Image (cartoon, grey):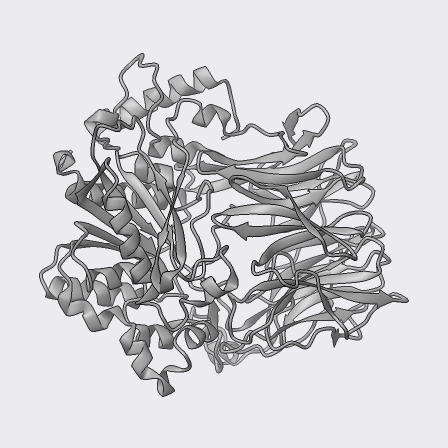
Amino acid sequence: MGKISPPAEQSKGAAGGQAVGQRGSDMRRLRWLVLTGALTLPPSLVPLPGHAQKRAITLVDYLGLPNVGGPQLSPDGKLIVYTVTTYSLPDNRGTSRVWLADVASGQTRQLTQGPGSDRQPRWSPDGRSVAFVSTRQGGAQLWVLPLAGGEARQVTSLADGVFDPVWLPDGKGLLVTSDIKWPAQQEIDRRNGEYPTEARLWTDLFYRHWDDWRAGKRQHLFSVSLGDGHAKDLTPLDRDVPTIATGGDGDVSVAPDGREIAVAIHTDPVADRTNVEINAMRPDGSGVHALTSGPGADNTPRYSPDGRWLAYLSLERPGFEADRSRLMILRRKDGRTDSGGATEVTSGWTLSVGSYTWCPSSQCIFAVVEERGRENIYRIDRPSFRRSAVVSGGGVNTTVTVSPDGNSIAYLHQSNTEPAEVWFGGRRLSHHSDSGTAALDLHPLESIGFIGALGDSVYGWVLKPPGFDAARKYPLVYLIHGGPQGAWDDNWHARWNYQMFASRGYVVAAVNFHGSTGYGQKFTDAISQHWGDYPYDDLMKGLDVLARLPYVDSTRMGAAGASYGGYMIYWLAGHTDRFKALVAHDGVFNAASMYGSTEELWFVEWEFGGALYGNRALYEKWSPLTFAPHWKTPMLIVHSQLDYRVDLSEGYQAFTALRKMAVPAKFLYFPDEGHWVLRPRNRRLWWSTVLDWLDEYLRPETRGR
């Protein structure tokens, strides 16, 4: 679900070495950074030479940890391909490689190398080759690597590259998605003539998305022949196919007999509607027709292995991209899918299915479900639709693939103390982060609960700092999630990492207020048209609970948030003086200007009860701008040039308000980032600036260090 802050990316560091040697290297780098002033730590957290105790995580550690993702089980169930991304400050980028794990022995090895990055590995139907997308030559193109030996071979040479490869059942080709210029002849070309410019010209909405300009281009589905690399546009339509908004976790699927392709298409390609339908077409792209007709968004089609069913995810309410995601199935007959009579597999459930996959027998489906700050994996039997948890109890478990016998699954597991690694059948296969975390003092999250707004139970997390001493009192950092229909989960967050905030000696707290996902759809719905009351009540009542903890210093509390969390920071500034410092990242300051500058109008129209022009009163009621005259708390604002969801002007307006009222403020601006800060050097700068700002007001003894 998009919203103004999508779920935490799972993308969303270095391969493991010997723990002792790696720790010695990290300690030498850490001491160098401290001595040169490149990284400042509170004195109590600076490790001493030879000190055997575990220590706080540092920026060096954090940026050095690998990112493991995308496990795919081979057709025979013996091997798993996955990716490992490492990050480089000198190169200012991440580099991904494809790795291979042996299920039986647990041994892993790097499968690809060379220039560029390799990602999205996909097994061929016979299991003899792996297709992947690589930037090693000619942009992001499709490559195929035979596992028996030999070099990888480039298959495509499309001008704007490819992504999301899907094998055809006969193994003779693949489907890929690629951006193309649309239409081929454009007014801007005629006006530029022989002197091209960087200017853009458009006549309709949705001309940009997240951090990408969409004016003058479309996303289309291509069929690629493995033999000669010929690529055919299967969807020469004035549509993005598959959809680029309100889509799912992979919106293209091919029937097992190869006679039908299912794809999610935005039926009304305008910025104020979410009507996405599952469409079917023949392998040559002909005969495109809708299989679903609901007013909301339908996405993530998946054919059952026996070809008798087509499953998909469905959001029922139009205009609401955080509606409950229902798992549906359609019956198929004679190689065609019946466009009527869909059955909901998850009827009676109040939670959403995030992703899913069929088991090989077609008699069950494995579904990933967010549940009370965790993501669990359920097995749903067919035809009874009886469900049972198969992976639960802690952390976040995603990216499921199923063994041929249907009895075991491969998946990614992560938690607040464990970066993502590949697991199979309940045991861990990969260990890329072991050496990087072995020396670190990483406390687990502890759950808290209280009665919040509307008399509802509200839950959250507390994290104690490294070297925690129950006899001491610690300053508090209160984290506020985005979305607003999102949640703080027990994960190793790729951007707002709990351990990094705790590393400076802070107790870290994160409350899943009304609007959060994973607590039932009614709880999620409660925030719409109530941005400033129910969530604020929850946060203040949660703060009361936290302030009473014997180890929290209630006179030294700060808050930080991004997207909707940034909005709430602005809102807090106008409604409470309990915080000594605030950090707002890409937040909404002026709801009215947000309406006119964001790209997904369905989002603001749902959240504020209609278009600005007919419902201005509610926009002003919940706008932090209205209460800016009450601002007194020092604030750091972070905003980026390429953020098209919450425009940069929101941050400018908030900073102007702060300085006009003589409130201490600082603005951190990134010209090359969007809604998230992703580049390694920018991430380094973000963390040092944010943590130093909090230290200045919450740990005054560190000021000037």
- Indicate the position of residue 58 as horizontal and vertical percent values: 33, 31
- Indicate the position of residue 314 as horizontal and vertical percent values: 63, 67
Q: Is residue 494 above or below residue 348?
A: above
Give the camera-side residue of 324 and 53. Answer: 324
- Indicate the position of residue 278 as horizontal and vertical percent values: 69, 69
The structure residue drawn at horizontal position 70% and vertical position 73%, both measured from the top left corner, is: 292
Give the camera-side residue of 4 and 531. Answer: 531
Residue lying farthest to the bottom in this orientation: 614
Q: How many marks?
A: 0
Residue lying farthest to the top in this orientation: 50
The structure residue drawn at horizontal position 66% and vertical position 24%, both measured from the top left corner, is: 107
From the viewer's perspective, tell me whether residue 455 is left or right of residue 41. right
- Indicate the position of residue 158 as horizontal and vertical percent values: 65, 58
Q: Is residue 630 above or below residue 561?
A: below
The answer to whether residue 602 is visible is yes
From the viewer's perspective, tell me whether residue 537 is left or right of residue 288. left
From the viewer's perspective, tell me whether residue 669 is left or right of residue 90. left
The answer to whether residue 283 is visible is no
Quarter placement of the C terminus: top left
The structure residue drawn at horizontal position 86% and vertical position 58%, both measured from the top left corner, is: 257
The structure residue drawn at horizontal position 84% and vertical position 60%, both measured from the top left corner, is: 308
Residue lying farthest to the right in this orientation: 334
